Image (cartoon, coloured by chain):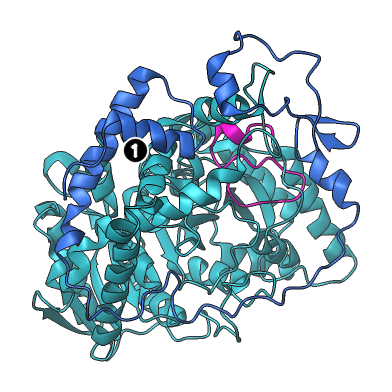
Chain colours: A cyan, B blue
Amino acid sequence: MLTARRIADQVRAGDLDPIDVLEQALQRLAVREEHVRAYLDPDVEFARRMADVVVERLNRGEDPGRLAGVPVSLKDNIAVAGRSLTAGSRALEGYRAPHDSCVAERLIAEGAVLLGRTNLDEFGMGASTESSGFHATLNPWDRERVPGGSSGGSAAAVAAGIVPLALGTETGGSIRQPAALCGVTGFKPSYGAVSRRGVVAFGSSLDQVGPIAAHAEDAALLYDVIAGHDPLDSTSAPGERASALSVRADLEGLRIGIPEEFLDERVDKRVLQQIEKAVQVLGDAGAITKRIPRGRLAHMQHSIAVYHLVACSEASTNLARFDGVRFGPRVSDGHALWPLYEDTRGTLFGPEVRRRIVLGTFALSAGHADAWYRRALSVRALIRREFQQLFDDYDLLAGPTSPFGAFPLGEKLDDPVAMSLCDLLTAPACLAGLPSVSVPCGLVRKGSFKGLPVGLCLTGAQGDDPRVLAAARAFEVARGEPERSPLWELEA
Amino acid sequence: MPDLIDIELLRQLTRLARLGVSPDEAEALAEDVAALLAHFESIASVEIDDAPESSDTPANAGSPAVDEATLWPQPQDTLLSLSAHTQDGFYAVPTQRERTEIERAPPASGAARDDDEPQA
């Protein structure tokens, strides 16, 4: 599969037909999708119409844009006008978006061919894509294992080589963790860098849209397209965004710290071995790497608690709108309004969503809000300050993305505490609003995750998105082409 | 912190959240939420007097958009098209009744009736 950048360059130059590019992707989809179940709706005819539009623009002598003819799959919580938008929930089954999200507008304007709606944990709540209201997605490296989540469909589609690019969303790790578990690159931008308009809200102070790509350079390309101020999103940061592709991919002289808090005792030791090798690669390429003794991120140990309390509180209010009246289907005996609400929400929301709504309702309730929600906000402010102080001394921080590799399907599904640990190393950057990327850094050699990919996580200061992506590109060049899943070359 | 989630509180929370759960589900839900809260109890020990002013959004988030009305073509038709349950230009919902009345005389379960009265 060609990189997105090469596809766009060749389409713009007239050397490649966007319809051929799409048909090749559809052939890969036809062969590989049954192995991963990455899509909720492949929406093939819509993709064909989009490819036709790119051809029409070329025929008129127009430049279709930076993503000319590139197939891009979108997580099914990102609105595209007139297309299905379920957010992985039975509560939105059959619902169609009335307008484009900001990111969809930008993709279409740059000539992308939107191919399909990818699977996710319901409303983005989960770390395995098993909590989808429709079906689980399977890991392209091992079909008995999860792809991570909640953007597991997008990560699996890219890792299976169906599309070179996909969009995910992240609230506590939902782009980077599945990218790590599937062996691809996933980038969570700084909070406010990318508009959230038209994205089904989960935790509004945390949610961000970001790219998942087979190559770090393509992740930077997609970030450049979707980033920028949106006056219709009040949380969109003002001002121009620097281009990530314009920053030279070079590690020379970068000060990269490795906080010992990132090397938690709960991290699998064979995952840590791969991280040590990755740090060696960074150093060999000219970066100044240094261990940071435990203590400077002292409050990071509370990240999981703070993340869940804040995100669930916000979710409990954001999801109040889904009650069977204004959106989606309804469960009702037809006799009274209140039971309609309770039956619709109680029946159509899955167990993980119900659990998080109850937790958030508790944390916000009179008599408990001071001890839980407001305290969590204060601890979040402490976590954010510690990160800001570290970036006085370091350009980037490095560590593992996930404490472990892809785990077996069902292993953590009935244990919410165990599942919550999937966010152990990703939630802190979300709480602090920092840009952070996961890049593949090798396969586990032995043990229970043998043969599965590991992700190196690089995190920068808020607003330093181009530098983070430049470091990821440089790391990929220094280490070489990432290992690919067994599905990558699968033909009919 | 004491264990704060029992069945009675769980029922209050599900009522607040408008979530219908069966008695069996309520018990399991209470156990799960209690386990999570026990796991999150550590934040009670954090010294927060020194914490910066707390905010739920990072510092560089944009200023709120200008609060002004903009025309949306055919807003009523667009909004109604999002709902599967409309009638005569309104959302169609069952008659609102007081909760106490519902609890006193619960309706028989069954399919939606044809004589639902629409309410705007």
Residue A355 in the image, given as x and y percentages of width and height: 37, 37
Front-lying residue, A429 or A448? A429
Q: Residue at x 67, y 11 (%)?
A: B111
Q: Amino acid at mark 1?
A: Val
Q: Find residue A481 and report its horizontal and vertical position in percent.
A: 36, 62
Position in image of residue A261 (x %, y %): 15, 68
Residue A156 placement: quadrant:
top left
Look at the image and say whether residue A79 sits in the magenta stretch: yes
Residue at screen point 63% across, 40% down: A26
Res. A149 in view: no
Between B88 and A236, the one nearer to me in the picture: B88
Dot 1 alpha-carbon crowd within 10 angstroms: few under 14, some 14 to 19, many 20 or more:
many
The magenta segment is A75-94
Q: Is residue A208 above or below residue A160?
A: below
Using the image, determine if residue A303 lies above or below residue A238: above
| Depicted A476 relative to depicted B49: above or below | above
Q: Chain of mark 1?
A: A
Which corner quadrant of the image does residue B77 belong to?
top right
Which is nearer the eye, B13 or A417? B13
Please tell me whether residue B79 belongs to the stretch shown in magenta. no
Residue at 55%, 82% (x, y): give it: A243
Query: How far from the left and from the top, in percent, is residue B4?
Result: 24, 42
Say what secondary structure mark 1 lies in.
loop
Q: Is residue A306 above or below residue A193?
A: above
Among the 4 quarters of the image, the one containing residue A2: bottom right
- In the picture of the structure, the residue carrying the numbered disc 1 is A146
